[in-house]
Amino acid sequence: MYFGVDYYPEHWVYPYAGTAEKPESRWEEDAALMVAAGVNIVRMAEFSWGICEPKEGEYDFGWLKRAMDIMKKAGIKVMLGTPTAAPPLWLSRKHPEILPIDAHGRVRHDGTRRACCLNSDIYWDYTQRIIRAMAGALGKHEQLVAWQIDNALGGHHTESSFNDETRRDWHAWLEAKYETIDRLNDQLGMRWWGQTVTEWQQVPMPREAPTLHNPSLVMDWMRFNSDTVLAYVKMQADLLHELTPSIPVTSNLRALTRRFDHFDVAGALDFVSVDNNATIKTRSSETACELDMLRSLKKTGIRTPDGDNGFWVVEEKAGQVNWQDVNSLVRPQVVRLFTYQLISRGATGVLYFPWRQPRLGTEKFFGAVLQHHGRKDGRTYQEISQVGEEVKLLAPVLKGTKVVADVCILFSHDNDWALHQPLQPNKHFSLREHVQLIYNGFHHRNVPVDFARPTEDLSKYKLVVAPSLHLMAGGEADLLKLYVQNGGTLVGTFNTGLVDEHHIAPDQGYPHDLTDVFGLEVIEFDPLAPGDENHMTFKGAFTTSHLHPAKLWCDVIEAKGCQVLATYAKDFYAGKPAITMNTYGLGKAIYIGTMSHQHFYDDLVVWLRQLVNLHPLLKVPDTVEVSMRQKDDTRIYFLLNHQNSPVRIQFYKPMHDFLSSSTIAGNYDLPPHGVLVLDEHGSLTKPADPNAYP
Ligand code: GLA
């Protein structure tokens, strides 16, 4: 397993470190400290273009080679970033047309990072030149094990620009998709406000306008921007594969927040990497959810430097960030805890960001492995060294293990983009919040979850949950039908199938193309203001621990053959179905017509677990997060206490504590922010009885 740091040797030369005689002398000290902390990889160079090519065509990779040589002596491998996230100033001065233009027609200027339009041919050309030069100079270095393409693609809202070259590509993209102007006019509903076009060149980019653009057009604009990012990534990946075929490529993604299709981009990479900001999250389940999303981006065809499965976290924040109003310190043992959370959810490489707090630039007061003083007695360095020791022990037993889930939550970027458009039926509805409530239900019961696009093969999952697929493409609905028909259990919800892939509303009832699967029709829907509540009355099939409210949205449902599990308690639709279940083919389709509080989703999961026979991992108190990696007869459980106080866990059978090499039985107090790694091999692997636990 790779365990490392993000290192910026260019920051640690005279006059910031070293001496006038030996300007780079700090680098050897850094390498020695890294080795002592268990580090076996560094990521470098992702912002170094202006230093590697200070003037056009004049390259200087010597400093980077010297840094890599020092790493070689220390036995540390290297991931290099292609430096295209920070174009040098000479380039934008020579070609100001590469600078991105915003929706208001204003230039976003140079002098920081990401100031480039990804539709610019010139930028593509210079990208290829710097990559060829870098791969030529360093691609055969023994230490190089991976390339990171660019850095934080789409960051600082740079997924789209409104340059002339963007317009050119936009029109070509539309022409390739629709082939005829008539088809474009029809499928995008351009008759709305009489905005039909007679030539491709007339189709607007959705720039700042008196009011809102046609949502069908905006959907295509989002897809076009996503394809632009994807094409840029593919171009870099293809070039790197050609120049250094044995070196896998990755890129650091964020949890589905950037406005491009993360599944598509993951498909162009050999393995997925992630930036993780766990230190700012209020609930551990939020990070867990993000990690499960990111792990799910690439399920097959993974090629990592050590041949292991899984994803890498190439920026695990080693301390506090610097962009909140108040950037409090991360408490002792919390970085260790978060590292185990990454590993437990499938990470096979972890690199902390950054190695040392920079003395220069905008990120001076970001938490880091080393503080400004660079000494080894700092708290974070000590804690990470402890993790480094533990990872050395764990790596052999983790090799080849992975997270296995029987449950899948569906997520599509098309749908997310549709739901982010203005003028929603209820602007207080958030897809992310809805997904999180459902996810938490599984997380609270320690049931592993994958994410997938609706177009993936879902047949291996016992249960598929599809929260609010507002935009439902015909093909997606057909695949869901097939899944249920063949014996799967599908849970659908309100705000599903209200528009098709072109953002056109259906004329055959909601949810579009799925009324037969659910055995119902949504006749109307009633968005509720925050604070307004209806209630659900349950009809027996479903045991409930609380009175469950119906919030934000109530579908008015007409049952057409389905069983009614709960009804609304008041208003003109009192007594009408709120939750239903239908048998379709060999499977079942459950429909939840409203949103509720967390207790409802917890109860829902208890019921679903019995319905489809899901195995919880271990019985532990709610405040302990459990995840598991497995391979053949080996199971490694991770128990994480996210609380600042001890938690008592009762073990009904003896378990082996991997880190202390001892056996645990009976009561065990997991310390504040503590971690337990339990391993089972061979005959102990009988799954837990799903009904034995509350
Ligand atoms: C991203 C970037 C890093 C750093 C952090 C700051 O993760 O990749 O270089 O700027 O943001 O939060």
Image (cartoon, rainbow, N blue to C red):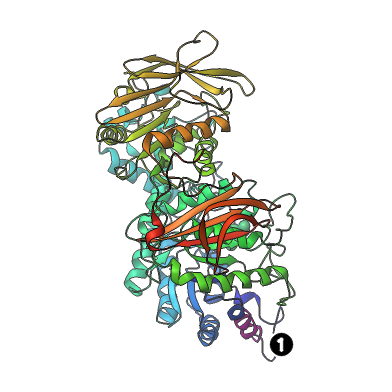
Locate residue 4: give its quadrant: bottom right
**Relative to the observer, which residue lies in front, 321 or 132?**
321
Magenta stretch: residue 406 in it? no
Q: Residue at x 51, y 29 (%)?
A: 212
**Relative to the observer, which residue lies in front, 75 or 205?**
75
> Can residue 4 be seen by looking at this rendering?
yes
Locate residue 179: give its quadrant: top left
Task: List the residue tagged with mark 1.
Answer: 19
Vertical placement of residue 35 versus 86, above or below: below
Question: Residue 294 vs residue 570: left or right?
Answer: left
x, y percentage for residue 43?
A: 53, 71
Magenta: main secondary structure equals helix
Residue furthest toward the bottom?
A: 21
> Can residue 54 be seen by looking at this rendering?
no
Provide the secondary structure element on which disc 1 rests.
loop
User: Badge 1: how crowded within 10 Å, few (<14), some, or many (20+)?
Assistant: few
The magenta segment? 25-33
Question: Residue 526 vs residue 489: left or right?
Answer: right
x, y percentage for residue 509?
A: 35, 18
Q: Residue at x 49, y 64 (%)?
A: 84
Locate residue 9: give its quadrant: bottom right
x, y percentage for residue 385?
A: 62, 73
x, y percentage for residue 301?
A: 32, 60
Ligand 1 found in image quarter: bottom right
Vertical placement of residue 504 versus 651, above or below: above
Question: Residue 9 vs residue 576: left or right?
Answer: right
